[in-house]
Image: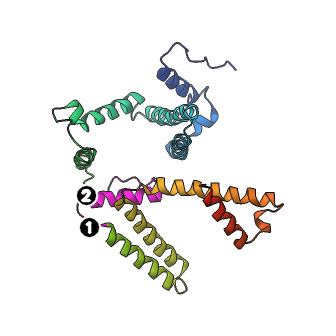
Amino acid sequence: MARTPVPDPSLPPIDRLLAVMAALRDPRTGCPWDIEQDFATIAPYTIEEAYEVADAIARGDMDDLKGELGDLLLQVVFHAQMAQEAGRFSFDDVAGAIADKMIVRHPHIFGEESRDKSAEDQVRDWETVKAAERAARDKGGVLDDVALGLPALMRAEKLQKRAARVGFDWPDAGHVIDKIAEEARELAEARDTLSQDEIADEMGDLLFVMANLARHLKVDPETALRATNEKFVRRFRDIEAALAARGKRPEDSDLAEMDVLWDAAKAKGL
């Protein structure tokens, strides 16, 4: 079988990438795996690549970030290629639409409005423009376009922010803390009498209110929990190392010993 010609390396990089993707999707000569994919099967990879970009940023690895951004860009190109094949839109349509959107949403840069605004003013203006866009798309509900595919904690925060902008919010963090205490107490008191589904429902309520507290304290809950996850990993690895120096593994230890080692890891600043 004749090989597919390699796209011209003298092409602008984005044009070369588009040509690569078109070749991979060619129904006669393309890659069988790429040909079989659709929007639904590719979506999980798109989410995964976005997280890998965030991971490279968190690690401060710029070389890795370059590669991960390329992987994420490939996801955009993949979706655009499938849409073009279906006669819906092209990559140029995607790029043009986001350029137009950024111009409309930044009247203080591209329009007549003053640049003398705080970041908070700009966020408020941004939400006003987005509300008008939702109304134009017949999506006038306040919560209508908060993406279902977001991580649950992130979506909780976005739902709460959106509701707060129309006045549905506790007045201060103190009220949220009171609600957290109430939800935790209800869960603790009822855990022996509730079904597993009811316990999950109550646990969801508690997590939702915790996300609300983070918002009131101006903390990104997803970022905060991600950092705590990594802190837990560092400290537990230190426990494993300390136990290994004693010729032991975690399963050979007990909670009392590991708790002392945890405090030691914490004292090291891990």
**Local crowd at mark 2 within 10 Å, few (<14), some, or many (≥20)?**
few
Name the residue that disc number 1 marks. Answer: 171
Colour scheme in use = rainbow
> As drawn, is 193 to the left or to the right of 208?
right
Q: Position of residue 13 (x, y in %)?
A: 50, 20
Q: Residue at x 32, y 57 (%)?
A: 161
Q: Position of residue 119 (x, y in %)?
A: 28, 44
| Residue lying farthest to the front in this orientation | 267
- Looking at the rendered image, the quarter that the N terminus falls into is top right
| Residue lying farthest to the right in this orientation | 247
Q: Which residues are magenta?
A: 145-172
Name the residue that disc number 2 marks. Answer: 165
| Residue lying farthest to the bottom in this orientation | 193
250 vs 3, nearest the viewer: 250
Q: Residue at x 72, y 70 (%)?
A: 257
Please, what secondary structure does the residue beneath circle 1 have?
loop
Please, what secondary structure does the residue beneath circle 2 have?
loop
Query: Does the segment drawn in magenta span residue 155?
Result: yes
Is residue 238 in sight in this rendering? yes
Q: CA distance from mark 2 to mark 1?
A: 12 Å
Q: Position of residue 70 (x, y in %)?
A: 53, 31
28 vs 80, nearest the viewer: 80
Q: Position of residue 130 (x, y in %)?
A: 26, 46
Query: Does the segment drawn in magenta span residue 104?
Result: no
Kind of residue indicated by mark 1: Pro
**Local crowd at mark 1 within 10 Å, few (<14), some, or many (≥20)?**
few
- Looking at the rendered image, the quarter that the C terminus falls into is bottom right
